[in-house]
Image (cartoon, rainbow, N blue to C red):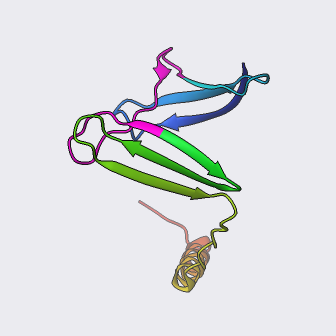
């Protein structure tokens, strides 16, 4: 197993843990282990009854479709990932740069006012 990634897992658990992921170079099987030694286990729960679902993935070209089926109530969900789809970066907010520039200008003017003063207490 070779290390492939590490990330801070803060959304799953109130205590922050580091998740290390590994991949076998021969069979490409992946595994995740937290810094506490606990193994990461993938689970998907049914949106209707909260039972753990069974899943099956199919890849056609660069589109991966995963179907989740609940063994308890029969509910099915589908998730599609298009690897060719390009996500456009959002444009920066013009007001943010204006506020940042104004803040920098205010700091300069305040520091210029205080440079020539002597303070006595």
Q: Is residue 109 above or below residue 13?
A: below
Q: Is 29 on the left or on the right of 98, as rendered?
A: right
Q: Is 83 on the left or on the right of 78, as rendered?
A: right
Q: x%, y% of residue 65?
A: 54, 52
User: Magenta region, mostly helix, strand or loop?
Assistant: loop
Among the 4 quarters of the image, the one containing residue 15: top left
Is residue 56 a member of the stretch shown in magenta? no
Quadrant for the N terminus, please: top right
Among the 4 quarters of the image, the one containing residue 31: top right
**83 vs 88, nearest the viewer:** 83
Q: Is 95 on the left or on the right of 20, as rendered?
A: left
| Residue for point 57% across, 56% down | 81
Q: Is residue 17 above or below residue 73?
A: above
Q: Residue furthest right?
A: 26
Q: x%, y% of residue 71?
A: 29, 34
Residue segment shown in magenta? 33-55
**14 vs 69, nearest the viewer:** 69
| Residue for point 61% across, 76% down | 108
| Residue for point 31% across, 39% down | 70
Q: x%, y% of residue 37?
A: 51, 14
């Amino acid at each position: 197993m070779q290390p492939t990634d590490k990330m801070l897992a803060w959304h799953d658990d109130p205590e922050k843990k580091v998740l290390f992921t590994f991949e076998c170079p021969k069979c490409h099987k992946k595994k995740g282990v937290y810094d506490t030694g606990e193994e990461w286990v993938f689970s998907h729960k049914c949106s209707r009854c909260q039972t753990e679902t069974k899943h099956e993935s199919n890849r056609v070209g660069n589109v991966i479709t995963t179907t989740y089926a609940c063994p308890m109530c029969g509910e099915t969900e589908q998730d599609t990932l298009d690897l060719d789809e390009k996500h456009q970066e959002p444009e920066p907010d013009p007001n943010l740069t204006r506020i940042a520039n104004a803040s920098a200008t205010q700091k300069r003017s305040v520091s210029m006012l205080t440079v020539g003063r002597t303070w006595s207490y």
